[in-house]
Image: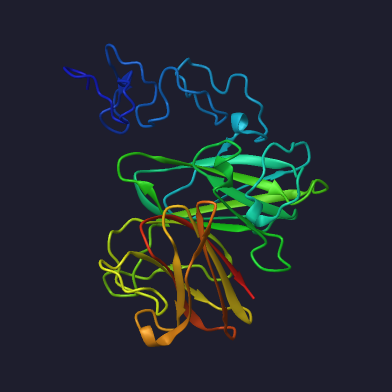
Amino acid sequence: MCVHTPVDGDGDGFAAASVTPSAGGPTFMCAGGTDCDDSRDRVFPGAPELCNGRDDDCDTMVDEGCDTRPDTCATAREIVVGATGTTTVGGSFGGLHDDYQTSPICGAMSRGRDAVYYFDLPRGLFDVTIDTIGSDADTVLGVGFSCDAAGLQLACNDDIVDGDTNSRIWLHRVGSATSTTRVFVLVDAFRDSVTGDYLLNVSRRPAASDSCPAPIAGEPMDISGGGTVLGYNSRFFGAQRGNCAPATTPNPPEAVFSLTSSGGGMRFDVYSVDFSPIIYSRRTCDAFGSELGCSLPASAGGVSRATLEVPLAPGNLTYFFVDGGRGSYAAYYRPL
């Protein structure tokens, strides 16, 4: 109840217009409060009105002036992702326009029609899987944390494996301890002639540990099947080191992934502007002697890149490491 100090439960700087102390109980109006939804920090008087079926700017009108198609950032459509399970939305490229491009790394043709979506992660660190599995159309995925031409090119994926026109991006250990995190997703048609239907599947879960399997630490993130990882090394120290890596003190942090090979081998390409990635693969996670390959980075234009190809028969469990420093990276994995 608003008795002495106005309540600002979502921390957006605007006090609640009303509060309901208990589920099903009475609602109390708060003198001086103007926030029409104090559970969402992006809803307050004067906030941008998004096309999401909600009154974002607290003017009692919903989605005024909105185009219902998710054609641009101005009409981006919200995906409500539950704590567990997968949320699926769908659409058609027919009737959409070419407004944005995914990263050139993925090689999509120009003038492909595209759709823009977004979802919000609550406070904390999460792993998220975003894919277009089940789509009829040939898709390319892009993700970013701002909705503009550059922001949507943070990472991309085209064709999980050769011959499969579906796309997949994993987010690894993404989020904030102090605020919600908005993620924008670009679903792009591979070329201008693509006008078919697409599906967009999004699932989230608590972030997996960046360590080798252990009873307390749990299992690392599984990236079997191919796709792109956009991740963040947040620790200050690491526990592993590739055989090609220089001996440095302290040992820099690493990200750890598990995967079961599905083809005749694996190819990894890792990019970072925050650190110089050293990448390696092992049969046994914490056994230096089981290493299958190790690669040092090269730098150009402010971006460091490391590439590794490992021949491996199908059905083998292996571990992949992104080592070398603290910060963000994009890891592209393709079964060979």
- In the picture, measured across the screen, residue 268 lies left or right of residue 326, that is right
**In the rendered picture of this protein, how many numbered marks are placed on residues?**
0
Identified at 33% across, 64% down, the residue is 253
Horizontal and vertical percent position of residue 265? 60, 80
Pick the front one: 60 or 327: 327
- In the picture, measured across the screen, residue 201 lies left or right of residue 173, that is right
Identified at 32% across, 74% down, the residue is 247
Pick the front one: 213 or 107: 107
* In the depicted structure, whether residue 203 falls above or below residue 260: above
Q: Which quadrant of the structure image shows residue 312?
A: bottom right
* In the depicted structure, whether residue 268 falls above or below residue 303: below
User: In which quadrant will I find the C terminus?
Assistant: bottom right
Identified at 45% across, 17% down, the residue is 46
Outermost residue to the right: 193
User: In which quadrant will I find the N terminus?
Assistant: top left
Snapshot colouring: rainbow
Residue 27 visible in the picture:
no
Horizontal and vertical percent position of residue 145? 49, 42
- In the picture, measured across the screen, residue 77 lies left or right of residue 83, that is right
* In the depicted structure, whether residue 113 falls above or below residue 214: above
Outermost residue to the left: 4
Q: Which quadrant of the structure image shows residue 276?
A: bottom left
Residue 184 visible in the picture:
yes
* In the depicted structure, whether residue 135 falls above or below residue 263: above
Pick the front one: 28 or 313: 313
Horizontal and vertical percent position of residue 153? 58, 46
Q: Which quadrant of the structure image shows residue 300?
A: bottom right
